[in-house]
């Protein structure tokens, strides 16, 4: 087990926006089947880490490894960029991202939204992709919404469609950035249920969330970030039950215990 490399591993990651250093040396790994949650106050760098992990953002120092394969870079510092666009595409399509704002195409039906990338990016056969898209829409509980447009769905249904779209890429891991933050509490629950099911199935996931109850329920490992550094990390019962750092204690007492 332990000699299989993690699906996604970040080592000593550093990231700046111009002169603003936002990630200051962070190590995070998710092995197959791990659910790793990133928590921390606004601006602590949670989204930036996810975006660097799937190469939506450049980083200046450190390594990013996908199943043991390091990203190859050219240049250094603020001029460091991935060297191989095919490697970037392969890694990015294997780390499907789900965003707070769903990002569905308004002019495509839900079915078309879900099958679009498998067909155009992965070159899958349309018929096969459609079958997979229907399967995943059914799985997230909106199999009856294939032919409607995003605007005709509730926020919770749109987010579940976005999750089906991510699953339809058949990625090695899913990256969630605040998947429930844009939703009303009752719609939030239907999305959390889907995420819990995915965790139970053994999906590898990294989840940025403000929802401490969800983090406690679904995670194997929780990382608390503070100003671009890991302040504390551990299994959820220890992190939430017996926080050691004063900053984490303060953060937890200021967030809604749910
Ligand atoms: N495109 C950008 N250009 C400049 N600075 C940025 C950019 N994106 C993020 N930052 C800065 O980087 C820091 C980390 O931002 P990030 O979005 O990763 O935080 P976060 O932990 O996800 O916060 P939130 O909980 O509010 O989503 C912040 O100081 C932010 O202002
Ligand atoms: Mg964020």
Image (cartoon, rainbow, N blue to C red):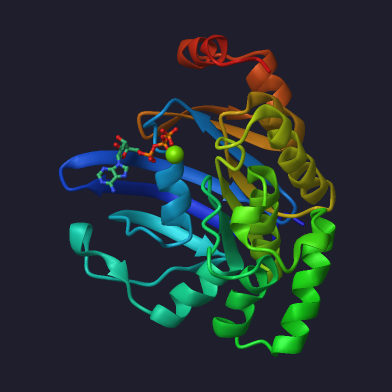
Residue appearing at x 46%, y 14% in the figure: 247
Q: Position of residue 89 (x, y in %)?
A: 48, 76
Q: Nearer the viewer, residue 127 or 75?
A: 127
Q: Nearer the viewer, residue 177 or 238?
A: 177
- Rendered image quadrant of residue 235: top right
Q: Position of residue 237 (x, y in %)?
A: 73, 22
Q: Nearer the viewer, residue 131 or 93?
A: 131
Quadrant of picture, ligand 1: top left
Q: In the image, 147: left or right of 101?
A: right
Q: In the image, 55: left or right of 152?
A: left
| Count of all numbered marks drawn on residues in the image | 0
230 is higher (above) or lower (below) than 205:
above
Residue appearing at x 66%, y 75% in the figure: 115
- Rendered image quadrant of residue 76: bottom left
63 is higher (above) or lower (below) than 230:
below
- Rendered image quadrant of residue 136: bottom right
Q: Residue furthest left?
A: 19
Q: Position of residue 106 (x, y in %)?
A: 53, 63
For the question of whether residue 4 can be seen, the reply is no
Q: In the image, 223: left or right of 41?
A: right
Residue appearing at x 77%, y 85% in the figure: 128
Q: Nearer the viewer, residue 161 or 41?
A: 161
| Quadrant that contains the N terminus | bottom right
126 is higher (above) or lower (below) than 197:
below
């Amino acid at each position: 087990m332990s000699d299989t490399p993690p699906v996604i591993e970040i080592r000593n990651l550093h990231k700046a926006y111009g002169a603003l250093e936002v990630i200051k040396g962070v190590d995070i790994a998710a092995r197959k089947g791990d659910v790793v949650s990133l928590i921390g106050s606004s601006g602590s760098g949670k989204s930036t880490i996810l975006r660097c992990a799937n190469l939506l953002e450049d980083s200046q120092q450190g390594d990013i490894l996908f199943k043991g394969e390091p990203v190859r870079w050219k240049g250094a510092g603020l001029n460091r960029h991935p060297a191989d666009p095919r490697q970037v595409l392969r890694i990015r399509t294997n780390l499907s991202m789900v965003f707070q704002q769903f990002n569905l195409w308004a002019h495509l039906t839900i079915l078309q939204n879900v099958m679009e990338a498998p067909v155009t990016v992965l070159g899958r056969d349309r018929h096969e992709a459609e079958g997979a898209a229907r399967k995943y829409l059914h799985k997230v509980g909106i199999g009856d919404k294939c032919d409607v447009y995003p605007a005709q769905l509730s926020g919770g249904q749109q987010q579940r469609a976005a999750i089906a779209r991510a699953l339809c890429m058949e990625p090695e891991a899913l990256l969630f950035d605040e998947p429930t933050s844009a939703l009303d509490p009752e719609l939030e629950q239907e999305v959390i249920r889907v995420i819990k099911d995915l965790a139970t199935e053994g999906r590898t996931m990294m989840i940025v969330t403000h929802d401490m109850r969800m983090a406690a329920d679904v995670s194997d490992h929780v990382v608390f970030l503070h100003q671009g550094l890991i302040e504390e990390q551990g299994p959820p019962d220890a992190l939430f039950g017996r926080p050691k750092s004063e900053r984490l204690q303060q953060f937890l007492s200021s967030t809604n215990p749910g």
